[in-house]
Image (spheres, rainbow, N blue to C red):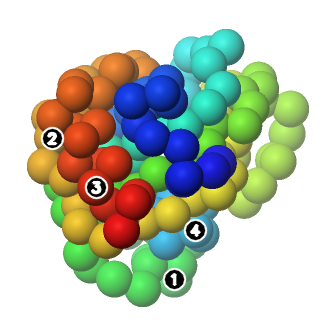
Amino acid sequence: MNTHHTTATTTWRGLTIRPPWSTLITLGIKSIENRPWTTRYRGPLLIHAGRTLDRIALTLPTVTDALTTDQHHPGHIVAVAHLADCHPDDGPCTPWAQPAHHHLVLTDIRPLPQPIAHRGTLGLWKPPDDVLRQLADQLAG
């Protein structure tokens, strides 16, 4: 993903992911997201940390061993990525793959210097103009 493009000419989508999963993606440790649905969308993606922490995930050794921070920034856009692919479960494409789900393949994952407060929603969502302006300021800097 080329961050030299302005957000005004780029079609962005956002995806809300419960922490700590969003944190693992932001850290570049987890490069797929598991969903029960598929999408044809490919392109720039905002990673939004949901407000609800997945407390069960915090008990899994694979998660706790991989986490290097407890700063999850719930209710904030924490990273940008490129949604490169979405494929049905075809076996463990990564250690994070979940059976019977679609795997959203994320590349070029980069944390934002300053998380952007925003209320996410289910599915892929279109970010509002005020979020895109804040994002453009950070990507330009």
Q: Nearer the viewer, residue 1 or 14?
A: 1
Q: State left or right for residue 53 relative to residue 104.
A: left
The relative height of residue 10 versus residue 106 in the rendered view (above or below) is above
Q: Nearer the viewer, residue 102 or 4?
A: 4
Reading the image, the residue beneath label 2 is: 118
Reading the image, the residue beneath label 4 is: 28
Marks 2, 4: nearer the viewer? 2
CA separation in Å, label 2 and label 4: 22 Å
Q: State left or right for residue 65 relative to residue 101.
A: left
Looking at the rendered image, the quarter that the C terminus falls into is: bottom left
Reading the image, the residue beneath label 3 is: 137
Name the spot of residue 59 as percent of width and height, x first.
37, 68
Q: Amino acid at mark 3?
A: Asp
Q: Which of marks 4 and 2 precedes in the sequence?
A: 4
Q: Residues within 10 Å of mark 1 (few under 14, many from 20)?
A: few
Q: Which of marks 4 and 1 precedes in the sequence?
A: 4
Tally of numbered discs? 4
Does residue 50 appear in this view?
no
Write down the quadrant of residue 48 in the picture. Answer: top left
Write down the quadrant of residue 36 in the picture. Answer: top right
Q: Residues within 10 Å of mark 2 (few under 14, many from 20)?
A: some
What element does badge 1 sit on?
A: helix
- Residue 65, disc: 1
Name the spot of residue 15 as percent of width and height, x first.
40, 34
Q: State left or right for residue 51 relative to residue 16.
A: left
Whether the residues at callouts 1 and 2 have beta carbons within 8 Å, the answer is no
Q: Which of marks 1 and 3 precedes in the sequence?
A: 1
Q: Amino acid at mark 4?
A: Gly
CA separation in Å, label 3 and label 1: 34 Å
Q: Residues within 10 Å of mark 4 (few under 14, many from 20)?
A: some
CA separation in Å, label 1 and label 2: 29 Å
